[in-house]
Image (cartoon, rainbow, N blue to C red):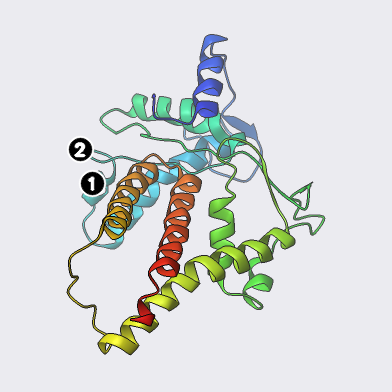
Amino acid sequence: QTHWRQDVLNFTTRYLEEGLKDRAITRDIDWGIPVPLDSFEGKCLYVWFEAVIGYLSATKEWAKSRGSEEEWRSFWQGDVKSYYFIGKDNIIFHTIIWPAMLMGYGELNLPYDVPANEFLTIEGRRLSTSRNWAVWLPDYLSRYDPDPLRYLLSINMPETSDSDFSWREFIRRNNNELVATYGNLVHRVLAFVYRSFDGCVPVPGELDIRSQALLNRAKDTLSTMDGLLYHCHFREAIRSAMSLAQEANRYLDEKSPWKT
């Protein structure tokens, strides 16, 4: 798949070129999903073999709950694409093992894209829930809105290499980018329209060269972002949006329409 992230493609290709080896899919345990075959008493399916089947079984359960047991096929057959958002330590299960299972079953679409991320650290240290080194969402949401965290994780996403989360960076990006750039632009435009045009966007007049250039850039940015989002390049997509917001703020500073 040429549209896959390079690390995902390289890892999968290398694994195939080295030659596929047998891999155990059962464990000798007394909990889990029993192997439904004779002479396999006491054996259960290995968690990562049965876990990926959950993608399929979940859609079947969903269809059953709607009283339309065949509706699950709309997720797996025909002109439909599936994306699997995972960490890099689970690539093999989604680019080789799960596709092999789907091929064995037959008539089901293979993964279209597996945009696996690299690792995210916190203040330079690897996440560890057992050592309480993590950002716990209930604690976070008791103090802050979710959007600043969504923004930081998106613009700092470890798409091609490991990245780090720090509270200093969280505050900086929130204040300098979300508030001072994007929030400022939204406030300036809406406040101006409210004061000068009774809250209704006016019919534009003839555009000068500078205004037309900004409009063209906005259209180009939307088109660029569409392609970036389609190929799961979320970091570049949001950076493109913020770059446009910066340019729009400069445009307002130059034109100062509130002075006319």
Name the image quarter holding the C terminus: bottom left
Badge 2 amino acid: Gly
Q: Residue furthest toward the front?
A: 260
Query: Which residue is located at x 31 percent, y 82 percent?
Result: 193
Taking the image as drawn, is residue 43 in sight? no
Provide residue 73's location: percent of width, then percent of height. Answer: 24, 44
Q: Are marks 2 and 1 in contact (CB under 8 Å)?
A: yes
Helix, strand or loop at disc 2? loop
Provide residue 60's location: percent of width, then percent of height. Answer: 32, 50
Taking the image as drawn, is residue 114 in sight? yes
Provide residue 74's location: percent of width, then percent of height. Answer: 23, 46
The label shown at residue 155 is none
Query: Which residue is located at x 30 percent, y 62 percent?
Result: 65
- Camera-side residue: 242 or 258? 258
Give the quadrant of residue 247.
Answer: bottom left
- Camera-side residue: 34 or 149? 149
Residue holding disc 1: 74
- Camera-side residue: 186 or 74? 186
Task: Say whether residue 20 is left or right of residue 249.
Answer: right
Badge 1 amino acid: Ser
Provide residue 164's location: percent of width, then percent of height. Answer: 70, 48
Helix, strand or loop at disc 1? helix
Task: Say whether residue 133 is left or right of residue 96.
Answer: right
Residue holding disc 2: 78
- Distance, label 2 to label 1, CA atoms, is 7 Å
Query: Which residue is located at x 73 percent, y 62 percent?
Result: 167
